Each structure stands twice: as structure tokens, then as C-alpha cells.
Image (cartoon, rainbow, N blue to C red):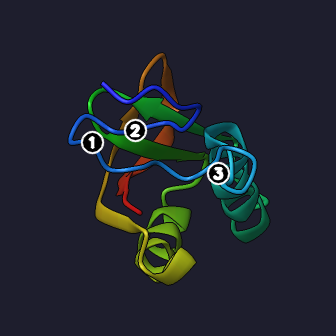
């Protein structure tokens, strides 16, 4: 085992200094800010992690679903994939558009 102050990954390669790399919180906030800027009329925007990071955009009108679905794959250099829509839990009159966040 190495005995220096550097951080190493499981495979033994050196990890970058935390001071020079953007924190996870900052990256997640950047994703949320991008979504809020692109979809200001959304009722709710959130992120969920269940092994994969999902973005959820809830809208009131069914006519808004197609617009959100068409814009999501082009945001953030294609960071939103597997875009799908369905019902919003506990809100029967809202529509949820979800996508997996990559990168």
C-alpha cells in the first residue's frame, strides 16, 4: 500500500485532486439549472438515483409533453437519453417526462 497523501482508485491509478475537480453537488446543480432554464413552465423538476441518474420534468398540459421530449436529447451535448413519458405519482393531472442522465 502506498504511504503518501494522494488518493488512489481501486485499480491503483491516481485520482485527481478534489480541489481541481467539480464536486458532485455542483455537477447535479448544473444539471438542474440547465433543466430549469430550458423548461421554466414545468411544475416540478427533479433528479432521482436508483443505480442510474434520472431527470424528471413534470408538466401540466399534455401538449407540453412533445416539446419537452423533443428538446431533452439535444440538451447538454446529448447528456439525456432514454426519454420517456408517463403519469406523475400522486398527481393525476400532471405528465412526467423522464430521461437517464449520462456524462
Q: Are dots 1 and 2 in contact, CB under 8 Å? A: yes
Q: Is residue 23 above or below residue 73?
A: above
Judge depth for marks 3 and 1 and give the one in front: 1
Q: Position of residue 84 (x, y in %)?
A: 29, 56
SS state under label 1 = loop
Nearest the viewer among 42 and 51 is: 51
Quadrant in the picture for the N terminus: top left
CA distance for labels 3 and 1:
25 Å
Q: Position of residue 30 (x, y in %)?
A: 71, 56
Dividing the picture into quadrants, the one containing residue 75 is bottom right
Label 3 neighbourhood size at 10 Å, few (<14), some (14-19), many (20+)? few
For image coordinates 47% across by 71% down, the residue present is 72
Disc 1: which residue: 12
Q: Is residue 5 above or below residue 59?
A: above
Quadrant in the picture for the C terminus: bottom left
Disc 3: which residue: 27
For image coordinates 64% across by 51% down, the residue present is 27
Q: Identify the mark nearer the N-term, 3 or 1.
A: 1
Disc 2: which residue: 8
Specify whether 36 is left or right of 48.
right
Dividing the picture into quadrants, the one containing residue 78 is bottom left
Amino acid at each position: 500500500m502506498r504511504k503518501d497523501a494522494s488518493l488512489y482508485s481501486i485499480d491503483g491509478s491516481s485520482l485527481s485532486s478534489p480541489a481541481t475537480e467539480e464536486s458532485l453537488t455542483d455537477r447535479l446543480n448544473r444539471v438542474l439549472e440547465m433543466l430549469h432554464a430550458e423548461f421554466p413552465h414545468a411544475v416540478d423538476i427533479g433528479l432521482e438515483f436508483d443505480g442510474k441518474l434520472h431527470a424528471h420534468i413534470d408538466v401540466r398540459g399534455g401538449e407540453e409533453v412533445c416539446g419537452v421530449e423533443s428538446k431533452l436529447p439535444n440538451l447538454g451535448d446529448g447528456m439525456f437519453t432514454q426519454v420517456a413519458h408517463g403519469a406523475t405519482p400522486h398527481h393525476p393531472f400532471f405528465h412526467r417526462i423522464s430521461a437517464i442522465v449520462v456524462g
